[in-house]
């Protein structure tokens, strides 16, 4: 089991559930815009939020952001140790640095001393795009071994100052390399790991790379907190992270919707029906919040697997010949026309969500 670290009131490691993070893409100094985006992320299920700190104006802005964010705040620091000090004075819950690029050992010690005093954890963040020159020269290119060596080297810098309130990340956009690097570090130390595939790309590509890279690690019980990195509205990152954890059985989503891939036996427009049910039921449960009773809905296109899957769900429909047979808790309750299926499923879901 990994060491226990706290980012605000969110436990990372020590057997805690994998927490979900994202990063704002607003200018941190623009407090209003940053808080608006944090609110949207928090509502989507973000549990820890990170903000870039490129200058002192941004570091100072973190004070108000921290006060109003409603979730733990992480300051992302590069190159200037003074930004780390100012961010901690602003009250952040964690800082992300690469100790090797924020100054000499005397200045690193200043950061560590303040982090100790304020009990603020440090994430040692290593990326394939910014490896040390000597490591690149030794391995000849970016490798999993080089990423792991860089991460552990930077951890040792902090350990030399008797500091161990550490989280580690070592990310690559190359999925196999990313996977191997995390495996090496996971076996080498007991610090909790922040996992992800960096620069995964636009949603259509990034979702695939992240599902493969992050999912593979989680299935091996590697990872204590995670960020899905997409070139998109960061809310998309939270949605995917929730979906991935639910698919792996690591979180229970309030509304689970399964649907068949369709085949030549399908005699309704199942893609439209399933998409609309997913959209409307998800919106319903987002509106109802934590008090809603969890539901599993099966949307099936034919008589082969349809009845069995529908019986195994709380609410289900097995379609055929322009109609849908509606199930509730394994029992057939009615048959409706194709254009009535979505409304009927939504009506049953809303009833089910508040049933004791």
Image (spheres, grey):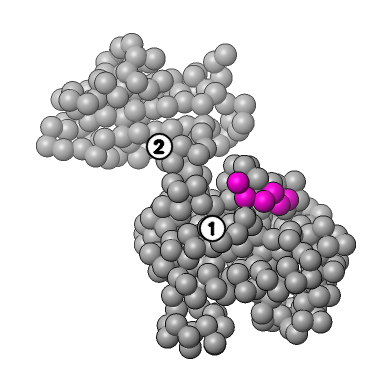
The numbered disc on residue 278 is: 2
Quadrant position of residue 99: bottom right
Check the image and report above or below for 72 versus 230.
Answer: above
Front in this rendered view, residue 166 or 341: 166
Q: Is tag 1's residue or tag 2's residue first in the polypeptide sequence?
A: 1
- Residue 67 numbered tag: none
Q: Is residue 182 left or right of residue 216?
A: right
Residue at the location (49% across, 76% down)?
146
Residue found at the far left of this picture: 264
Is 216 or 235 nearer to us in this picture? Answer: 216
Q: Residue at x 84, y 75 (%)?
A: 110
Question: Magenta segment range?
Answer: 1-6
In the displayed structure, 140 sits above or below 275; it is below
Residue designated by label 1: 186
Q: Is residue 204 left or right of residue 87?
A: left
What type of secondary structure mainly makes up the magenta span?
Answer: loop
- Horizontal and vertical percent for residue 328? 38, 15
Can residue 284 be seen?
no
Check residue 5 for magenta coloring: yes
Judged by depth in the image, the label closer to the viewer, 1 or 2, is 1
Q: Nearer the viewer, residue 273 or 66?
A: 66
Provide residue 36's location: percent of width, then percent of height: 67, 56
Relative placement, left or right, of 97 versus 140 is: right
Q: CA distance from mark 1 to mark 2?
A: 37 Å
For the point 51% across and 67% down, which residue is it?
171
Crowd band around label 1 with a 10 angstrom C-alpha radius: few (<14), some (14–19), many (20+): some
């Amino acid at each position: 089991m990994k060491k226990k670290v706290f980012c605000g009131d969110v436990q990372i490691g020590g057997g805690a559930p994998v927490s979900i993070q994202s990063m704002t893409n607003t200018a941190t100094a623009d407090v209003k815009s940053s808080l608006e985006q944090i609110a949207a992320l928090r509502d989507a299920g973000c549990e820890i939020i990170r903000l870039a700190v490129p200058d002192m104006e941004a570091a100072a802005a973190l004070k108000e952001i921290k006060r109003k964010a409603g979730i733990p705040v992480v300051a992302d620091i590069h190159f200037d140790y003074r930004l780390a000090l100012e961010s901690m004075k602003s009250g952040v819950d964690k800082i992300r640095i690469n100790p090797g690029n924020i100054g000499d050992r005397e200045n690193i010690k200043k950061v560590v001393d303040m982090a100790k005093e304020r009990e603020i954890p440090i994430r040692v963040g290593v990326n394939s795009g910014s490896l040390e020159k000597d490591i690149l020269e030794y391995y000849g290119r970016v490798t999993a071994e080089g990423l792991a060596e860089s991460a552990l080297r930077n951890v040792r810098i902090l350990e030399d100052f008797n500091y161990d309130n550490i989280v580690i990340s070592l990310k690559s956009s190359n999925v196999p390399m990313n996977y191997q690097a995390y495996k090496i570090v996971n076996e080498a130390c007991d610090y909790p790991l922040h996992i992800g595939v960096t620069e995964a790309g636009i949603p259509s590509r990034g979702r695939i790379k992240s599902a493969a890279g992050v999912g593979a690690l989680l299935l091996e019980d590697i990872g204590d907190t995670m960020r899905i990195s997409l070139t998109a509205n960061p809310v998309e990152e939270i949605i995917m992270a929730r979906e991935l954890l639910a698919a792996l059985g690591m979180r229970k989503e309030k509304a689970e919707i399964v649907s068949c891939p369709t085949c030549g036996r399908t005699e309704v427009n199942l893609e439209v029906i399933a998409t609309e049910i997913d959209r409307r039921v998800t919106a319903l449960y987002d509106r109802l919040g934590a008090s809603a009773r969890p539901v599993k809905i099966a949307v099936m296109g034919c008589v082969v697997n349809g009845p069995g899957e529908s019986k195994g769900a709380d609410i289900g429909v097995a379609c055929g010949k322009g109609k849908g047979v509606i199930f509730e808790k394994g029992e057939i309750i009615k048959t409706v026309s194709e254009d009535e299926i979505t409304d009927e499923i939504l009506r049953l879901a809303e009833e089910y969500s508040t049933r004791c």
